Image (spheres, helix red, strand yellow):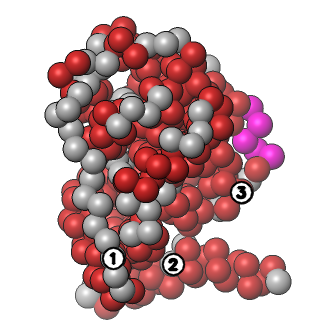
């Protein structure tokens, strides 16, 4: 059983066969893979192909499933719940939406206009870019299933707690009035056949890949530089476990960036294998995906400053706490 699991982990998810193939092809064209440039090129080609293949497959599966849950139906499901249960359901629904933080905001507006509780919508807004099925599988391909599952669970906990706190504060008056009546729900298409659903899922896979490939390429380039060019001692000094501020630094570095989970994984992978603590790596990823600067700017058009500051504060505090907990106890999961 262990051999089967190791094969699945290394060859199916980790795609070690692809890494071997890339290495052989580069050797065939005379590339010296003992140099920093050669190793960086191998890292770039392998990670770009691996993430792209997994991304297209995952988005196809997720999009096919989503054809059974158009926004109108999702709204009807959410309206049955309130309180903590509603926050949990909203966070879980966010996990099956393969959106970055900026893409989640129009859906947030649509659901808010539909009259759904504010706390529930913030649970969705946090979880949608932070955790999804794609992040689970991609994280598992790099860090293993234990860490991937724990990351998703922790992300859901932050989403539920964050949304619950915002709901309890009764901040409905902090929503900008101009959004009401201005945003529409997503297209409630009816898919009458499996072929129609497959066509939609293929189109979503292609469109999503076209959108995120620039972030993947940037992430892989940064990851390759970190992996092969930055001195080990420099990274350990800034982000190593001996630096008590490493988690805070990683979180603050991540926030101004704009990418989704697929673009941050190559950077996280490189940092992790350079000796950066697991909690610091995950804090960086969460900072990028949940609190990117462009999404904050876009969200400001929807909510007033008081609610925006509360939202950023809750999520940032949650990310930092998670980072330190993982740095302390993360070794038990590896």
For the image, the number of numbered tags is 3
User: What residue is drawn where x is 41% and y is 74%?
Assistant: 64
Give how far across and how far down residue 89 sits, in percent: 58, 45
Q: How far apart are marks 3 and 1 (CA)?
A: 36 Å
Residue 195 image position (x, y, % from top left) = 33, 88
Q: Is mark 1 on a helix, strand or loop?
A: loop
Start-end of magenta stretch: 327-332
Write down the residue under mark 2. 15
Quadrant location of residue 7? Answer: bottom right
Badge 3 or badge 1: first in the primary sequence:
3
Residue 282 figure quarter: top right
Instruction: Judge from the rendering whether residue 16 lies leftward or rightward of residue 306; answer left or right.
Output: right
Residue 110 visible in rendering = yes
Q: Earlier in the sequence, mark 1 or mark 2?
A: 2
Residue drawn 70% across the image and 30% down it: 325
Q: Which of marks 2 and 3 is nearer the N terminus?
A: 2
**Please, which residue is most extreme toward the top here?**
306
Q: How many neighbours does mark 3 have within 10 angstroms: few (below 14), some (14-19), or many (20 or more)?
A: few
The residues tagged by marks 1 and 2 sit, at their Cα atoms, a distance apart of 34 Å
Figure check: 43 above or below 32: above
* Marks 2 and 3, how far apart at CA: 18 Å
Is residue 221 shown to the viewer in this render? no
Q: Label 1 belongs to which residue?
A: 191
What x and y, as percent, mark residue 159?
55, 35
Disc 3 is placed on an element classified as helix
In the rendered structure, does residue 239 fall within the stretch colored magenta?
no
């Amino acid at each position: 059983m262990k051999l089967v699991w190791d094969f699945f982990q290394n060859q199916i998810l980790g795609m070690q066969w692809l890494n071997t193939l890339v290495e052989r092809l580069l050797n065939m064209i005379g590339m010296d893979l003992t140099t920093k440039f050669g190793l960086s090129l191998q890292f770039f080609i392998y990670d770009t192909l691996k993430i792209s293949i997994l991304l297209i497959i995952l988005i196809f599966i997720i999009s096919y499933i989503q054809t059974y849950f158009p926004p109108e139906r999702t709204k009807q499901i959410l309206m049955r719940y309130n309180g903590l249960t509603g926050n949990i359901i909203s966070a879980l629904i966010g996990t099956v939406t393969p959106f970055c933080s900026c893409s989640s905001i129009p859906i947030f507006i649509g659901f808010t206009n539909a009259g759904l509780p504010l706390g529930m919508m913030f649970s969705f807004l946090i979880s949608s870019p932070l955790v999804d099925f794609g992040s689970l599988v991609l994280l598992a391909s790099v860090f293993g299933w234990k860490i991937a599952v724990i990351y998703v669970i922790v992300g859901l906990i932050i989403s539920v707690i964050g949304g619950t706190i915002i709901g309890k504060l009764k901040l409905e008056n902090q929503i900008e009035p101009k959004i009401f009546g201005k945003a529409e729900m997503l297209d409630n298409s009816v898919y009458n056949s499996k072929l129609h659903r497959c066509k939609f899922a293929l189109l979503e896979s292609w469109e999503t890949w076209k959108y995120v490939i620039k972030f993947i390429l940037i992430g892989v380039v940064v990851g390759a530089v970190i992996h092969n060019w930055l001195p080990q001692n420099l990274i350990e000094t800034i982000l190593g476990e001996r630096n008590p501020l490493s988690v805070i630094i990683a979180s603050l570095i991540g926030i101004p960036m704009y990418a989704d989970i697929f673009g941050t994984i190559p950077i996280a992978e490189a940092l992790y294998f350079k000796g950066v603590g697991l909690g610091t790596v995950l804090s960086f990823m969460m900072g990028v995906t949940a609190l990117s600067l462009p999404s904050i700017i876009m969200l400001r058009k929807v909510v007033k400053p008081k609610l925006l500051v509360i939202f950023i504060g809750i999520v940032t505090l949650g990310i930092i706490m998670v980072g330190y907990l993982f740095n302390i106890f993360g070794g038990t999961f590896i």
